[in-house]
Amino acid sequence: MTPKEEVVVGVIGGSGLYQIDGLVDVREVELSTPFGPPSDAYVTGALDGVRMVFLPRHGRGHRIGPSEINFRANIWGMKRLGVTRIVSVSAVGSMREDVQPGDFVVIDQFFDRTRHRPDTFFGQGCVAHVMFADPVCPEVRRALLAAGGKLGLNVRDGGTYMNMEGPQFSTRAESRLYRSWGIDVIGMTNLQEAKLAREAEICYATIAMATDYDCWHETHEDVTVEAIIAVMQRNVSNVRKLIQTAVPRLAGARGCACGRALASAIMTAPELIPADTRARLALLIDKYLPRS
């Protein structure tokens, strides 16, 4: 990134998150993408001079299941709107005794247990392999941790997010096995976002909000939708405050490697990339390819 690049902060999460004190110039933007329709219209605005873009990943009214989310369209739309950093807010089940419902975890690793989801922009004649050993932007993580500390929230530094397929919750056997693997939290949505954000050269980090103990905990009731919603409703004001506090810390120039993730990742010779594939990927790859 050059110092002249404008930082635009994207937020993916629930539909109430863009109701943040101080957000001005709010408007809705509907986009079509080469990968189909996004989950909903994007809500744009500005907070303390920083441009922001919000998207409810399940659509307003929570009408899109986790396996049905068009992750490629969602991230492509963020890129099209100039987003350079994404904060993803996600409800998760806790797999640790010391991460209680209502606590936050700033994730640093993912483990994939999904089966049915497109999770790359590439293919159809253009191959790219981005580095993904460290799947979360360290700069966005630091901003979220600092914001949580300033607010006095219970925020855990680091954790592994198991991305299950869903939409069913875990069996008791699965939940116990995942705990034995050292998994910290479990959810259904964030890994595809992280992979696609890396391919789009957008910084990405997850703030995971524990809503339950899945079904492993012997002294707590098994996870229910009602319990999840109750914890989310109690904590939504904390999520808004966290975003509001983190945004000024995200306004500076990027010093991470996220903005050059494709620089050495594209394997296909430019002249062999089909014209329709190059057109579909133009937003992502044109700066690395010779003019046709």
Image (cartoon, grey):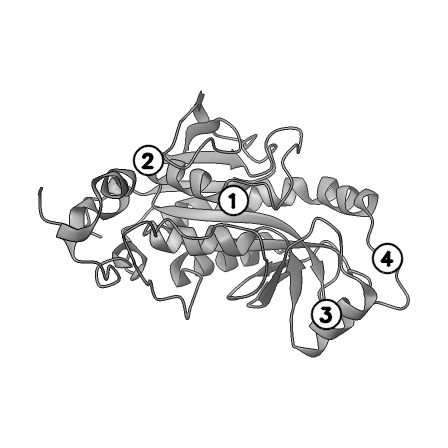
Residue at which label 4 appears: 222
Q: Of tags 3 and 1, which is closer to the observer?
A: 3
Residue at which label 3 appears: 96
Q: Sequence order check: which comes first, mark 4 or mark 3?
A: 3
- The label on residue 80 is 2
Q: Sequence order check: which comes first, mark 2 or mark 3?
A: 2
Q: Sequence order check: which comes first, mark 2 or mark 1?
A: 2
Name which residue lies at 49% across and 46% down.
245
| Relative vertical location of residue 51 with respect to residue 119 in this rendering, above or below | above
Q: Amino acid at mark 3?
A: Arg
Could you tell me which quadrant the C terminus lies in? Answer: top left
Q: Sequence order check: which comes first, mark 3 or mark 1?
A: 3
Name which residue lies at 39% across and 59% down.
139
- The label on residue 243 is 1
Labelled pair 1, 4 in contact (Cβ < 8 Å): no
> Does residue 239 appear anywhere in the picture?
yes
Which element carries disc 4, helix, strand or loop?
Answer: loop
Which element carries disc 2, helix, strand or loop?
Answer: helix
> Does residue 244 appear anywhere in the picture?
no
Q: Of tags 4 and 3, which is closer to the observer?
A: 4
Labelled pair 2, 1 in contact (Cβ < 8 Å): no
Task: Report which quarter residue 282 is drawn in.
Answer: top left
Q: Mark 3 to mark 1: distance in Å?
A: 25 Å
| Image x and y of residue 251, in percent | 34, 46
Q: Sequence order check: which comes first, mark 1 or mark 4?
A: 4
